[in-house]
Amino acid sequence: MKIETLSLTTPYLDLDPIFYHEVHPTPLTNPRLVSFNPQAARLLGLDPDKISPDIVTNILNGTHLLNGSRPYAMCYAGHQFGYYVPRLGDGRAINLGLLNGWNLQLKGSGQTLYSRQGDGRAVLRSSIREYLMSEAMHALGIPTSRALALIGSDEKVARESWEQGAIVLRLSPSWIRFGSFEYFFHSNKHAQLESLADFLITESFPHLAGVEDAYAKMYGEIVKRTAHMIAHWQSVGFNHGVMNTDNMSAIGITIDYGPYAFLDTFEAGYICNHTDHEGRYSFDNQPRIGHWNLAQLGRALSPLVSPEKTAHELEKYGDYFTAKLLELLKDKLGLDALPDDDSTLFRSLFTTMENGRVDMTPFFRTLSHYSGDRSALLALTLAPNGLNEWLDVYDACLQNNISSTQERHAKMVNCNPKYVLKNYILQEAIDLAQKDDFTLVNNLLNLAQNPYDEHPEFERYALTTPTHHTNLKLSCSS
Ligand code: AMP
Ligand code: MG
Protein backbone atom coordinates (compact mmCIF):
# COMPACT_ATOMS: atom_id res chain seq x y z
CA MET A 1 0.00 0.00 0.00
CA LYS A 2 1.13 3.59 -0.63
CA ILE A 3 1.47 5.89 2.32
CA GLU A 4 -0.76 8.55 0.72
CA THR A 5 -3.74 6.20 0.56
CA LEU A 6 -3.74 4.79 4.06
CA SER A 7 -6.04 5.98 6.77
CA LEU A 8 -5.41 6.29 10.50
CA THR A 9 -7.97 6.00 13.28
CA THR A 10 -7.91 7.72 16.67
CA PRO A 11 -9.87 5.57 19.16
CA TYR A 12 -8.13 7.29 22.10
CA LEU A 13 -10.00 10.48 21.25
CA ASP A 14 -13.29 8.72 22.00
CA LEU A 15 -12.31 8.89 25.66
CA ASP A 16 -13.20 11.84 27.86
CA PRO A 17 -11.19 14.95 26.76
CA ILE A 18 -9.37 14.91 30.10
CA PHE A 19 -7.27 12.05 28.68
CA TYR A 20 -5.59 14.10 25.98
CA HIS A 21 -4.89 17.44 24.39
CA GLU A 22 -5.36 17.86 20.66
CA VAL A 23 -2.35 19.67 19.29
CA HIS A 24 -0.56 19.88 15.98
CA PRO A 25 3.17 19.27 15.61
CA THR A 26 5.40 22.33 15.31
CA PRO A 27 7.65 21.76 12.28
CA LEU A 28 11.44 21.94 12.46
CA THR A 29 13.43 24.25 10.14
CA ASN A 30 15.03 22.54 7.13
CA PRO A 31 14.16 18.98 8.03
CA ARG A 32 16.20 16.17 6.48
CA LEU A 33 15.75 12.44 6.53
CA VAL A 34 18.47 10.77 8.58
CA SER A 35 17.17 7.22 8.37
CA PHE A 36 14.14 5.25 7.28
CA ASN A 37 13.44 1.73 8.53
CA PRO A 38 11.91 -0.55 5.88
CA GLN A 39 11.12 -3.25 8.48
CA ALA A 40 8.87 -0.89 10.41
CA ALA A 41 7.21 0.26 7.17
CA ARG A 42 6.23 -3.34 6.49
CA LEU A 43 4.71 -3.57 9.98
CA LEU A 44 2.37 -0.79 8.95
CA GLY A 45 1.43 -2.64 5.78
CA LEU A 46 3.45 -0.29 3.59
CA ASP A 47 5.72 -1.17 0.70
CA PRO A 48 9.00 0.53 1.68
CA ASP A 49 10.07 0.86 -1.95
CA LYS A 50 7.01 2.95 -2.73
CA ILE A 51 7.56 5.57 -0.05
CA SER A 52 9.20 8.79 -1.14
CA PRO A 53 11.77 10.22 1.31
CA ASP A 54 10.11 13.63 0.95
CA ILE A 55 6.76 12.36 2.14
CA VAL A 56 8.36 10.55 5.08
CA THR A 57 10.22 13.73 6.02
CA ASN A 58 7.02 15.76 5.83
CA ILE A 59 5.04 13.24 7.87
CA LEU A 60 7.67 13.32 10.60
CA ASN A 61 7.85 17.10 10.46
CA GLY A 62 4.08 17.37 10.79
CA THR A 63 3.65 19.16 7.46
CA HIS A 64 1.97 16.18 5.77
CA LEU A 65 -0.99 15.02 7.82
CA LEU A 66 -2.02 11.45 7.03
CA ASN A 67 -5.66 10.70 6.25
CA GLY A 68 -7.69 10.28 9.41
CA SER A 69 -4.97 11.67 11.64
CA ARG A 70 -6.02 13.94 14.53
CA PRO A 71 -2.83 14.67 16.45
CA TYR A 72 -2.96 14.61 20.24
CA ALA A 73 -0.79 14.41 23.34
CA MET A 74 -1.66 12.03 26.18
CA CYS A 75 -2.02 12.94 29.84
CA TYR A 76 -0.25 10.91 32.54
CA ALA A 77 1.54 11.22 35.87
CA GLY A 78 4.22 9.09 37.45
CA HIS A 79 6.72 8.36 40.18
CA GLN A 80 10.05 9.89 39.23
CA PHE A 81 12.97 8.56 41.27
CA GLY A 82 10.46 7.42 43.88
CA TYR A 83 8.53 10.70 44.17
CA TYR A 84 5.05 11.18 42.81
CA VAL A 85 4.63 13.91 40.18
CA PRO A 86 0.92 14.56 39.71
CA ARG A 87 1.00 15.68 36.11
CA LEU A 88 3.46 14.82 33.39
CA GLY A 89 1.98 13.78 30.05
CA ASP A 90 3.42 13.87 26.54
CA GLY A 91 5.44 17.06 26.82
CA ARG A 92 7.24 16.52 23.54
CA ALA A 93 5.43 13.61 21.93
CA ILE A 94 2.43 13.89 19.63
CA ASN A 95 0.34 10.91 18.56
CA LEU A 96 -0.86 10.76 14.99
CA GLY A 97 -3.26 7.83 15.26
CA LEU A 98 -3.50 4.08 14.89
CA LEU A 99 -2.54 2.04 11.83
CA ASN A 100 -2.41 -1.74 11.53
CA GLY A 101 -2.36 -2.13 15.33
CA TRP A 102 0.47 0.41 15.79
CA ASN A 103 0.06 3.80 17.42
CA LEU A 104 2.21 6.30 15.52
CA GLN A 105 3.88 8.88 17.70
CA LEU A 106 6.24 11.74 16.91
CA LYS A 107 8.84 12.51 19.57
CA GLY A 108 10.38 15.98 19.55
CA SER A 109 7.55 17.60 17.61
CA GLY A 110 7.01 20.68 19.75
CA GLN A 111 5.18 21.84 22.82
CA THR A 112 1.90 20.50 24.14
CA LEU A 113 -0.31 21.24 27.11
CA TYR A 114 1.97 18.95 29.13
CA SER A 115 5.33 20.51 28.27
CA ARG A 116 5.72 22.32 31.61
CA GLN A 117 9.05 24.20 31.29
CA GLY A 118 10.23 22.07 28.37
CA ASP A 119 10.69 23.14 24.77
CA GLY A 120 8.91 20.10 23.33
CA ARG A 121 12.01 19.17 21.40
CA ALA A 122 14.39 16.22 21.20
CA VAL A 123 17.97 16.50 19.98
CA LEU A 124 19.59 14.48 17.21
CA ARG A 125 21.90 12.67 19.64
CA SER A 126 19.13 11.19 21.77
CA SER A 127 16.85 10.61 18.77
CA ILE A 128 19.51 8.47 17.06
CA ARG A 129 19.88 6.54 20.30
CA GLU A 130 16.17 5.87 20.62
CA TYR A 131 15.71 5.05 16.94
CA LEU A 132 18.55 2.52 16.79
CA MET A 133 18.09 0.94 20.18
CA SER A 134 14.42 0.13 19.78
CA GLU A 135 15.28 -1.78 16.60
CA ALA A 136 18.25 -3.49 18.29
CA MET A 137 16.11 -4.62 21.21
CA HIS A 138 13.49 -6.03 18.89
CA ALA A 139 16.12 -8.03 17.01
CA LEU A 140 17.33 -9.44 20.35
CA GLY A 141 13.81 -10.72 21.02
CA ILE A 142 13.09 -8.09 23.68
CA PRO A 143 9.61 -6.53 23.75
CA THR A 144 9.93 -2.88 22.69
CA SER A 145 8.46 0.06 20.85
CA ARG A 146 9.70 0.34 17.25
CA ALA A 147 10.71 3.26 15.03
CA LEU A 148 9.83 4.09 11.43
CA ALA A 149 12.13 6.99 10.65
CA LEU A 150 14.21 9.84 11.97
CA ILE A 151 14.70 13.41 10.76
CA GLY A 152 17.30 16.01 11.69
CA SER A 153 17.08 19.75 11.02
CA ASP A 154 18.65 23.20 11.29
CA GLU A 155 16.56 23.93 14.38
CA LYS A 156 18.77 24.90 17.33
CA VAL A 157 17.82 23.32 20.64
CA ALA A 158 19.37 24.36 23.97
CA ARG A 159 20.76 21.59 26.13
CA GLU A 160 24.20 21.61 27.83
CA SER A 161 25.17 23.22 24.52
CA TRP A 162 23.23 24.10 21.37
CA GLU A 163 22.19 20.95 19.57
CA GLN A 164 20.25 20.02 16.46
CA GLY A 165 16.51 19.36 16.82
CA ALA A 166 15.27 16.01 15.54
CA ILE A 167 12.09 13.94 15.44
CA VAL A 168 11.62 10.17 15.61
CA LEU A 169 8.42 8.52 14.48
CA ARG A 170 7.99 5.70 16.94
CA LEU A 171 5.43 2.94 17.04
CA SER A 172 3.79 1.00 19.82
CA PRO A 173 0.70 -1.18 20.12
CA SER A 174 -0.06 1.07 23.13
CA TRP A 175 1.42 4.19 24.66
CA ILE A 176 -0.42 3.77 27.94
CA ARG A 177 1.93 3.81 30.91
CA PHE A 178 1.74 2.83 34.58
CA GLY A 179 1.66 6.58 35.13
CA SER A 180 -1.51 6.92 33.02
CA PHE A 181 -3.39 4.92 35.66
CA GLU A 182 -1.65 6.77 38.49
CA TYR A 183 -2.89 10.09 37.12
CA PHE A 184 -6.56 9.12 37.40
CA PHE A 185 -6.17 7.31 40.71
CA HIS A 186 -4.29 10.05 42.54
CA SER A 187 -6.56 12.78 41.21
CA ASN A 188 -9.60 10.82 42.38
CA LYS A 189 -11.07 10.36 38.93
CA HIS A 190 -12.14 6.78 39.37
CA ALA A 191 -14.72 6.68 36.59
CA GLN A 192 -11.99 7.71 34.14
CA LEU A 193 -9.65 5.17 35.71
CA GLU A 194 -12.17 2.50 34.80
CA SER A 195 -12.53 3.89 31.26
CA LEU A 196 -8.76 3.72 30.87
CA ALA A 197 -8.68 0.08 32.01
CA ASP A 198 -11.48 -0.74 29.56
CA PHE A 199 -9.63 1.06 26.81
CA LEU A 200 -6.42 -0.85 27.50
CA ILE A 201 -8.29 -4.16 27.50
CA THR A 202 -9.88 -3.36 24.13
CA GLU A 203 -6.59 -2.11 22.72
CA SER A 204 -4.10 -4.62 24.06
CA PHE A 205 -5.78 -7.40 26.06
CA PRO A 206 -8.88 -8.14 23.93
CA HIS A 207 -9.05 -11.75 25.21
CA LEU A 208 -9.99 -10.30 28.62
CA ALA A 209 -12.99 -8.30 27.38
CA GLY A 210 -16.11 -9.37 29.25
CA VAL A 211 -14.17 -11.95 31.29
CA GLU A 212 -14.84 -12.25 35.01
CA ASP A 213 -12.24 -10.39 37.10
CA ALA A 214 -10.86 -8.83 33.91
CA TYR A 215 -9.03 -5.98 35.67
CA ALA A 216 -7.24 -8.34 38.06
CA LYS A 217 -6.29 -10.56 35.15
CA MET A 218 -5.08 -7.56 33.17
CA TYR A 219 -2.89 -6.57 36.10
CA GLY A 220 -1.63 -10.16 36.33
CA GLU A 221 -0.61 -10.04 32.67
CA ILE A 222 1.18 -6.73 33.13
CA VAL A 223 3.07 -8.26 36.08
CA LYS A 224 4.10 -11.22 33.98
CA ARG A 225 5.09 -9.23 30.91
CA THR A 226 7.09 -6.74 32.96
CA ALA A 227 8.93 -9.55 34.77
CA HIS A 228 9.76 -11.20 31.47
CA MET A 229 10.89 -7.95 29.88
CA ILE A 230 13.27 -7.22 32.76
CA ALA A 231 14.60 -10.81 32.69
CA HIS A 232 15.46 -10.16 29.05
CA TRP A 233 17.23 -6.92 29.99
CA GLN A 234 19.32 -8.69 32.62
CA SER A 235 20.22 -11.51 30.25
CA VAL A 236 21.82 -9.16 27.71
CA GLY A 237 23.19 -6.56 30.12
CA PHE A 238 20.77 -3.74 29.28
CA ASN A 239 20.49 -0.88 31.77
CA HIS A 240 17.40 1.26 31.03
CA GLY A 241 18.46 4.12 33.26
CA VAL A 242 15.14 5.87 33.99
CA MET A 243 12.60 3.35 35.21
CA ASN A 244 10.17 5.98 36.44
CA THR A 245 6.57 4.74 36.36
CA ASP A 246 5.79 7.13 33.50
CA ASN A 247 8.39 5.24 31.47
CA MET A 248 6.85 1.84 32.21
CA SER A 249 4.59 0.55 29.49
CA ALA A 250 1.24 -0.95 30.51
CA ILE A 251 1.81 -3.70 27.96
CA GLY A 252 5.22 -4.63 29.33
CA ILE A 253 7.42 -3.43 26.51
CA THR A 254 10.57 -1.32 26.68
CA ILE A 255 9.81 2.35 25.97
CA ASP A 256 11.39 5.77 26.36
CA TYR A 257 15.02 5.14 25.63
CA GLY A 258 17.07 7.81 27.40
CA PRO A 259 20.49 7.42 29.02
CA TYR A 260 20.41 3.63 28.63
CA ALA A 261 23.49 1.45 28.18
CA PHE A 262 24.58 -2.02 27.39
CA LEU A 263 27.14 -3.16 29.91
CA ASP A 264 30.62 -3.31 28.52
CA THR A 265 32.60 -5.18 31.18
CA PHE A 266 30.14 -6.88 33.51
CA GLU A 267 29.50 -4.70 36.57
CA ALA A 268 26.39 -5.58 38.57
CA GLY A 269 26.10 -2.18 40.24
CA TYR A 270 26.62 -0.14 37.07
CA ILE A 271 24.55 3.07 36.83
CA CYS A 272 24.26 4.47 33.30
CA ASN A 273 22.40 7.65 34.28
CA HIS A 274 24.77 10.19 35.79
CA THR A 275 21.99 12.05 37.61
CA ASP A 276 21.03 8.83 39.44
CA HIS A 277 23.39 9.42 42.37
CA GLU A 278 21.94 6.72 44.58
CA GLY A 279 21.83 4.07 41.91
CA ARG A 280 18.09 3.60 42.14
CA TYR A 281 18.10 2.45 38.51
CA SER A 282 21.42 0.62 38.53
CA PHE A 283 21.68 -2.58 36.50
CA ASP A 284 21.18 -4.99 39.39
CA ASN A 285 18.35 -2.94 40.90
CA GLN A 286 16.17 -3.22 37.79
CA PRO A 287 14.27 -6.36 38.84
CA ARG A 288 13.49 -4.87 42.26
CA ILE A 289 12.39 -1.56 40.72
CA GLY A 290 10.13 -3.43 38.31
CA HIS A 291 8.40 -4.88 41.37
CA TRP A 292 8.16 -1.49 43.10
CA ASN A 293 6.67 0.08 39.97
CA LEU A 294 4.15 -2.72 39.64
CA ALA A 295 3.15 -2.15 43.26
CA GLN A 296 2.43 1.50 42.35
CA LEU A 297 0.31 0.34 39.44
CA GLY A 298 -1.51 -2.10 41.74
CA ARG A 299 -2.24 0.75 44.12
CA ALA A 300 -3.53 2.91 41.26
CA LEU A 301 -5.88 0.10 40.25
CA SER A 302 -7.22 -0.32 43.82
CA PRO A 303 -10.65 1.19 43.03
CA LEU A 304 -11.04 -1.58 40.42
CA VAL A 305 -9.17 -4.53 41.94
CA SER A 306 -9.02 -5.42 45.63
CA PRO A 307 -5.59 -5.09 47.28
CA GLU A 308 -5.70 -8.84 48.06
CA LYS A 309 -6.03 -9.65 44.39
CA THR A 310 -3.28 -7.30 43.23
CA ALA A 311 -1.02 -8.63 46.01
CA HIS A 312 -1.75 -12.18 44.85
CA GLU A 313 -0.78 -11.30 41.26
CA LEU A 314 2.28 -9.32 42.33
CA GLU A 315 3.52 -12.23 44.43
CA LYS A 316 4.13 -14.15 41.22
CA TYR A 317 6.54 -11.52 39.91
CA GLY A 318 9.68 -13.10 41.39
CA ASP A 319 8.88 -16.54 39.98
CA TYR A 320 8.07 -15.15 36.54
CA PHE A 321 11.30 -13.21 36.52
CA THR A 322 13.52 -16.03 37.76
CA ALA A 323 12.02 -18.68 35.51
CA LYS A 324 12.45 -16.48 32.43
CA LEU A 325 15.99 -15.44 33.33
CA LEU A 326 17.05 -19.05 33.97
CA GLU A 327 15.56 -20.13 30.67
CA LEU A 328 17.42 -17.35 28.84
CA LEU A 329 20.69 -18.14 30.60
CA LYS A 330 20.29 -21.85 29.93
CA ASP A 331 20.03 -21.02 26.23
CA LYS A 332 22.92 -18.57 26.35
CA LEU A 333 25.09 -21.32 27.82
CA GLY A 334 23.86 -23.87 25.30
CA LEU A 335 22.53 -26.27 27.91
CA ASP A 336 19.78 -28.69 26.93
CA ALA A 337 18.29 -28.54 30.42
CA LEU A 338 18.76 -26.52 33.57
CA PRO A 339 21.37 -28.11 35.83
CA ASP A 340 20.18 -29.23 39.29
CA ASP A 341 22.29 -26.59 40.94
CA ASP A 342 21.59 -23.81 38.47
CA SER A 343 22.21 -20.96 40.87
CA THR A 344 25.87 -21.97 41.38
CA LEU A 345 26.55 -22.11 37.68
CA PHE A 346 24.82 -18.81 36.86
CA ARG A 347 25.70 -16.80 39.93
CA SER A 348 29.35 -17.77 39.85
CA LEU A 349 29.45 -16.91 36.15
CA PHE A 350 28.52 -13.30 36.83
CA THR A 351 30.89 -13.03 39.79
CA THR A 352 33.65 -14.49 37.64
CA MET A 353 32.92 -12.02 34.86
CA GLU A 354 32.90 -9.10 37.25
CA ASN A 355 36.13 -10.17 38.99
CA GLY A 356 37.92 -10.57 35.68
CA ARG A 357 36.46 -7.35 34.11
CA VAL A 358 35.04 -9.46 31.33
CA ASP A 359 33.09 -7.78 28.55
CA MET A 360 29.78 -9.60 28.57
CA THR A 361 28.91 -9.66 24.86
CA PRO A 362 32.22 -10.99 23.44
CA PHE A 363 32.35 -13.47 26.31
CA PHE A 364 29.04 -15.14 25.48
CA ARG A 365 29.82 -14.99 21.78
CA THR A 366 33.22 -16.64 22.27
CA LEU A 367 31.62 -19.24 24.51
CA SER A 368 29.29 -20.02 21.60
CA HIS A 369 32.31 -21.54 19.81
CA TYR A 370 33.83 -23.26 22.85
CA SER A 371 34.77 -26.89 22.55
CA GLY A 372 37.40 -27.42 25.19
CA ASP A 373 40.15 -25.02 24.14
CA ARG A 374 39.95 -22.25 26.72
CA SER A 375 42.52 -19.85 25.32
CA ALA A 376 40.10 -17.47 23.54
CA LEU A 377 37.97 -17.21 26.68
CA LEU A 378 40.90 -16.78 29.03
CA ALA A 379 42.14 -13.94 26.85
CA LEU A 380 38.98 -12.01 27.84
CA THR A 381 39.57 -12.02 31.58
CA LEU A 382 41.98 -10.44 34.04
CA ALA A 383 41.29 -13.26 36.51
CA PRO A 384 42.01 -16.51 34.65
CA ASN A 385 41.94 -18.74 37.74
CA GLY A 386 38.34 -17.86 38.47
CA LEU A 387 37.31 -18.42 34.89
CA ASN A 388 39.12 -21.77 34.80
CA GLU A 389 37.19 -22.85 37.88
CA TRP A 390 33.93 -21.77 36.33
CA LEU A 391 34.75 -23.58 33.10
CA ASP A 392 35.34 -26.78 35.09
CA VAL A 393 31.76 -26.50 36.40
CA TYR A 394 30.51 -25.66 32.92
CA ASP A 395 32.32 -28.60 31.33
CA ALA A 396 30.67 -30.90 33.85
CA CYS A 397 27.23 -29.46 32.94
CA LEU A 398 27.92 -29.94 29.24
CA GLN A 399 28.46 -33.66 29.92
CA ASN A 400 24.70 -33.86 30.52
CA ASN A 401 23.84 -32.38 27.13
CA ILE A 402 22.27 -34.72 24.63
CA SER A 403 22.84 -32.46 21.61
CA SER A 404 26.21 -32.49 19.88
CA THR A 405 28.83 -29.76 20.23
CA GLN A 406 28.01 -28.60 16.71
CA GLU A 407 24.31 -28.36 17.51
CA ARG A 408 25.13 -26.46 20.68
CA HIS A 409 27.28 -23.98 18.79
CA ALA A 410 24.60 -23.45 16.17
CA LYS A 411 21.99 -22.65 18.85
CA MET A 412 24.30 -20.46 20.88
CA VAL A 413 25.30 -18.14 18.04
CA ASN A 414 21.62 -17.48 17.54
CA CYS A 415 21.02 -16.35 21.09
CA ASN A 416 24.35 -14.69 21.92
CA PRO A 417 24.58 -11.56 19.76
CA LYS A 418 27.88 -10.74 18.18
CA TYR A 419 26.90 -7.06 18.27
CA VAL A 420 25.08 -4.92 20.78
CA LEU A 421 24.95 -1.16 20.35
CA LYS A 422 27.30 -0.09 23.09
CA ASN A 423 27.38 3.60 23.92
CA TYR A 424 30.76 4.27 22.36
CA ILE A 425 29.54 2.77 19.08
CA LEU A 426 26.42 4.92 19.09
CA GLN A 427 28.55 7.96 19.86
CA GLU A 428 30.63 7.38 16.72
CA ALA A 429 27.45 7.40 14.64
CA ILE A 430 26.18 10.50 16.45
CA ASP A 431 29.43 12.40 15.88
CA LEU A 432 29.23 11.74 12.15
CA ALA A 433 25.52 12.52 11.98
CA GLN A 434 26.15 15.92 13.59
CA LYS A 435 28.21 16.60 10.45
CA ASP A 436 25.36 15.42 8.22
CA ASP A 437 26.98 12.07 7.48
CA PHE A 438 24.30 9.48 8.19
CA THR A 439 26.14 6.46 6.79
CA LEU A 440 27.06 4.98 10.15
CA VAL A 441 23.55 5.51 11.56
CA ASN A 442 22.21 3.46 8.67
CA ASN A 443 24.95 0.84 8.93
CA LEU A 444 24.21 0.51 12.63
CA LEU A 445 20.53 0.05 11.83
CA ASN A 446 21.53 -2.97 9.76
CA LEU A 447 23.84 -4.21 12.50
CA ALA A 448 21.13 -3.68 15.12
CA GLN A 449 18.59 -5.62 13.09
CA ASN A 450 20.99 -8.53 12.43
CA PRO A 451 22.99 -8.83 15.66
CA TYR A 452 23.74 -12.55 15.35
CA ASP A 453 25.33 -12.25 11.90
CA GLU A 454 29.06 -11.93 11.35
CA HIS A 455 29.39 -8.52 9.59
CA PRO A 456 33.19 -8.86 9.16
CA GLU A 457 33.50 -5.16 8.22
CA PHE A 458 32.38 -4.23 11.76
CA GLU A 459 34.50 -6.78 13.60
CA ARG A 460 36.01 -4.14 15.89
CA TYR A 461 32.56 -3.43 17.38
CA ALA A 462 32.38 -7.07 18.47
CA LEU A 463 35.53 -6.84 20.56
CA THR A 464 35.95 -5.87 24.19
CA THR A 465 35.17 -2.16 24.55
CA PRO A 466 38.32 0.00 24.69
CA THR A 467 38.99 0.78 28.38
CA HIS A 468 38.53 4.54 28.09
CA HIS A 469 35.00 3.96 26.72
CA THR A 470 33.97 1.34 29.26
CA ASN A 471 30.78 1.74 31.33
CA LEU A 472 30.59 5.50 31.01
CA LYS A 473 27.70 7.44 32.53
CA LEU A 474 25.29 9.41 30.38
CA SER A 475 23.47 12.65 30.81
CA CYS A 476 19.70 12.50 31.12
CA SER A 477 19.27 15.60 28.97
CA SER A 478 17.83 14.72 25.62
P1 AMP B 1 11.47 11.52 30.19
O1 AMP B 1 12.42 11.61 31.32
O2 AMP B 1 12.07 11.80 28.84
O3 AMP B 1 10.69 10.25 30.20
O4 AMP B 1 10.44 12.71 30.38
C1 AMP B 1 9.71 12.93 31.57
C2 AMP B 1 8.62 13.93 31.34
O5 AMP B 1 9.16 15.17 30.91
C3 AMP B 1 7.61 13.53 30.26
O6 AMP B 1 6.37 14.02 30.64
C4 AMP B 1 8.13 14.23 29.05
O7 AMP B 1 7.13 14.46 28.10
C5 AMP B 1 8.65 15.53 29.63
N1 AMP B 1 9.73 16.12 28.83
C6 AMP B 1 11.00 15.66 28.71
N2 AMP B 1 11.72 16.47 27.91
C7 AMP B 1 10.90 17.46 27.50
C8 AMP B 1 11.04 18.60 26.65
N3 AMP B 1 12.19 18.89 26.07
N4 AMP B 1 9.96 19.37 26.47
C9 AMP B 1 8.79 19.10 27.07
N5 AMP B 1 8.59 18.06 27.86
C10 AMP B 1 9.61 17.24 28.09
MG1 MG C 1 9.31 9.36 29.35
Image (cartoon, rainbow, N blue to C red):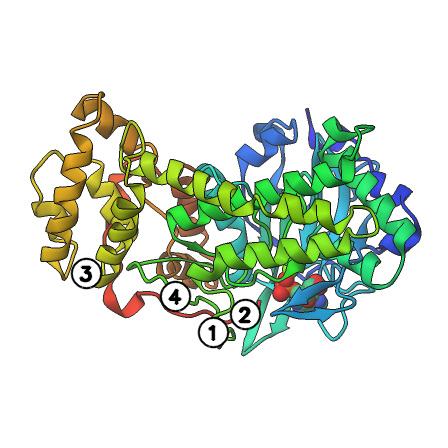
The relative height of residue 76 versus residue 226 in the rendered view (above or below) is: below
- Give left or right: position of 139 versus 86: left
Going by the numbered disc 4, the residue's amino acid type is: Tyr
The disc label shown at residue 476, or none: 2
Report the front residue among 448 and 1: 448
Residue 367 position in % (x across, y down): 20, 40
Task: Classify mark 2: helix, strand or loop.
Answer: loop
The secondary structure type at the circle numbered 1 is loop
Residue 161 x %, y %: 54, 78
Q: Is residue 318 visible?
A: yes
- Circle nearer the N terminus (2, 1): 1
Instruction: Select label 4 or label 2 by which is in front.
Output: 4
Q: Which mark is residue 356?
A: 3
Point out the tag, 3 or 4, that comes first from the N-terminus. Answer: 4
Residue at 22%, 21% (x, y): give it: 403
Disc 1, ligand 1: is the CB inside 8 Å? Answer: no
Q: Is residue 147 visible?
A: no
As drawn, the label of residue 274 is: 1
Q: Which amino acid, by three-letter code, is at mark 1?
A: His
Q: Which mark, residue 270?
A: 4
| Depicted 46 relative to depicted 350: above or below | above
C-beta proximity under 8 Å, tags 2 and 1: yes
- How far is mark 1 from mark 4, CA to CA? 11 Å
Q: Secondary structure at mark 4?
A: loop
Q: CA distance from mark 2 to mark 3?
A: 30 Å
78 vs 153, left or right, is: right
| Location of residue 110 in the rendering, given as x and y in whole percent from the top left corner | 74, 62
Instruction: Name the image quarter holding the N terminus.
Output: top right
Q: Quadrant of ligand 1?
A: bottom right
- Mark 2 residue crowding within 10 angstroms, few (<14) / some (14–19) / many (20+): some
